[in-house]
Amino acid sequence: MTVIAFIVGVVLLVVGLAASIALHEIGHLVPAKRFGVRVGQYMVGLGPTLWSRRFGETEYGIKALPLGGYISMAGMYPPAPARAGRAAAEGRAGGGFFATMVQDARDANNETIVGDDRSGTFYALPMWKRIVIMLGGPTMNLLLAMVLFAIVFSGIGVQTATTTVAAVSECVLPAGSTQTTCTSSDPVSPAAAGGILPGDVLVSVGGTAVATFEEASAIIQASPNETLDIVVRRGGAEQTLRVTPALAERQVAGPNGTAVTAEVGFVGMTVTLDYVRQPIWDGPQAALQQAGQVVGIMWQLPARVYQTASDLVTGAPRDPNGPLSVVGVGRLAGEAAATDAPVLNRVATILGLLGSLNLALFVFNLIPLLPLDGGHVVVALWDGLKRAWAKLWRRPRPAPVDATRLVPVTFVVVIALIVMGGILIIADIVNPMKIFG
């Protein structure tokens, strides 16, 4: 059953990834068609085509590997001048590597351009329309992440410690002890001595009303060896119990969320966990905060991948905040689905992983390098500035910016992405991250 659950988790992640890619490409497709650009293909996935059908001018299809997607727009690159076209043809015949790549790029995107007809071409659009088209994909990923986080935070809820007592310890055990049962020499826990019972609902502690367990815990931890009046609701009626927290070493939250050992007040009780639905804006807000964290990871991506490779070779522990490949995210989804936890916990974890994956797609595609969407935005901005400058000085409209001149840079970027992706995939197979230990 665990193996089946693991497979189901991986499949759900793959389906969610494919849907995310499909929506990303729709984010490009809709404004492109709205602005009159001829779109030859809309494809979800890479590799061999599994299914396709043509509707109007556009062929829609699904490919074998759900690791990417694309739309093919007419005129992504402007046609080559006659001299450049001859040079490219000679380069193709004579073995000019980058010249051949440039011409192939032009051919792939300009099949529907006839002569000097620029209608329906991407490069002929105003700058702002080109930017809208290229930002449409990442924006869809951001919106999808916000929706997924909203479902987790407001639809399912955040698992939160309530004020209902779940269990009361019989005795006080030393911090870090492996002892699981009480002996006659162990001191009775303050909660048990004070008469707190499972099922009691904490109403107030030390005269202060409490609505959450965090509020009750803060008062107890700050009051070692001080007798507190604890009001509980039991069987529909309120009762006042007198409890004296013992001084004990316990793990508490320290700076930056780290756990530290400190001497605090301790009574020896645990409370129930329940899903508490958060305000509808909390999910989108959390998505935006996490997007900022992803930006920091992407900014340091080469260094982090290098560190991952070094840890892989040396056998050092892997950075839990380091980057993951799709394989790694899939393994985490499988682990979440197979763990012995309530179904809602598992669903929330997988939805959170999909949300985080969409945030990674959002940030990654904004990197200002071709062939990523951010690279095309930079080209559009440069083209718009050239046009605005010429208009300001009443000069003839300049030729469109030829992005194919950046093909060598694009080639290097693609190779770097392949290498980094390969390193992460190997690390996720040999030394995978785990959600639960």
Image (cartoon, rainbow, N blue to C red):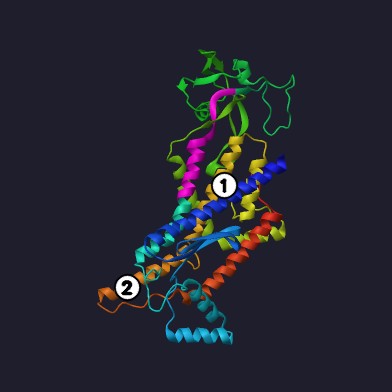
Write down the residue under mark 1. Answer: 353
Q: Position of residue 233 (x, y in %)?
A: 52, 16
Q: Position of residue 352 (x, y in %)?
A: 55, 44
344 shown above or below 211: below
Tell me if residue 151 is in the magenta stretch: yes
Secondary structure category for the residue under label 1: helix
Tell me if residue 28 is in the magenta stretch: no
> Magenta span covers which residues?
143-165
Corner quadrant of residue 268: top right
Corner quadrant of residue 74: bottom left
Q: Residue at x 55, y 60 (%)?
A: 52
Q: Residue at x 59, y 37 (%)?
A: 345
Hey, what amino acid is under mark 2? Arg
287 shown above or below 63: above
Q: Main secondary structure of the magenta part?
A: helix
Residue 387: mark in rendering: 2
